Amino acid sequence: MAKGKSSGSGGVGLRKLHLVKDKERGDWALKPEGGDRALRRFERKADARKGGAISDALGKQGGSVRIHRRDGQIQEERTYPRSKDPPGSRG
């Protein structure tokens, strides 16, 4: 299975990313699930969420992003494009 892909229910084949606070650098990092290297970095979480930065990082195939709080807890999960939302999703 390709890195960044999921075999779980609902999100089959969707690329999964996480937006997390990097405590060492003090910025926000967009990382593939299970990966250590950031695909993109942002000074503020709001910068990542505006202007299509997340959907651009996912590319044409789309995928899901888990947006974390500063403490590491998941704040929300978003799917791009919305048409890729699994059936029964609250989003």
Image: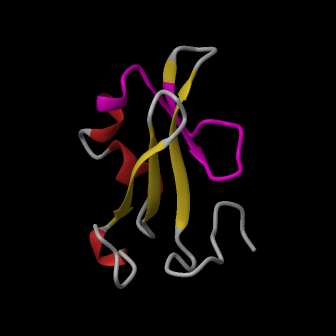
x then y, percent, for residue 48 = 36, 35
Residue 74 sits above or below residue 23 on the image? below
Residue segment shown in magenta: 28-46
Residue 20 forms part of the magenta stretch? no
Furthest toward the top, the residue is 25
- Does 28 sit above or below residue 37? above
The residue lying at 36 percent from left, 85 percent from top is 87
Residue 22 horizontal/vertical position (percent): 58, 24
Q: Residue at x 44, y 34 (%)?
A: 69
Q: Position of residue 82 (x, y in %)?
A: 28, 70
Coloured how? secondary structure
Magenta-drawn stretch contains 44: yes
User: Observer-nearest residue: 50 or 23?
Assistant: 23
Q: Residue drawn 57% across and 40% down?
A: 39
Say if 18 sits above or below 44 in the image: below
Which residue sits furthest bottom? 87
Residue 49 shown left or right of residue 43 in the figure: left
Give the side of residue 50 with respect to residue 10, left or right. Answer: left
88 over 63 or under it: above or below: below
Quarter the C terminus occupies: bottom left
Q: Position of residue 79 (x, y in %)?
A: 37, 64
Picture quadrant where residue 80 is located:
bottom left
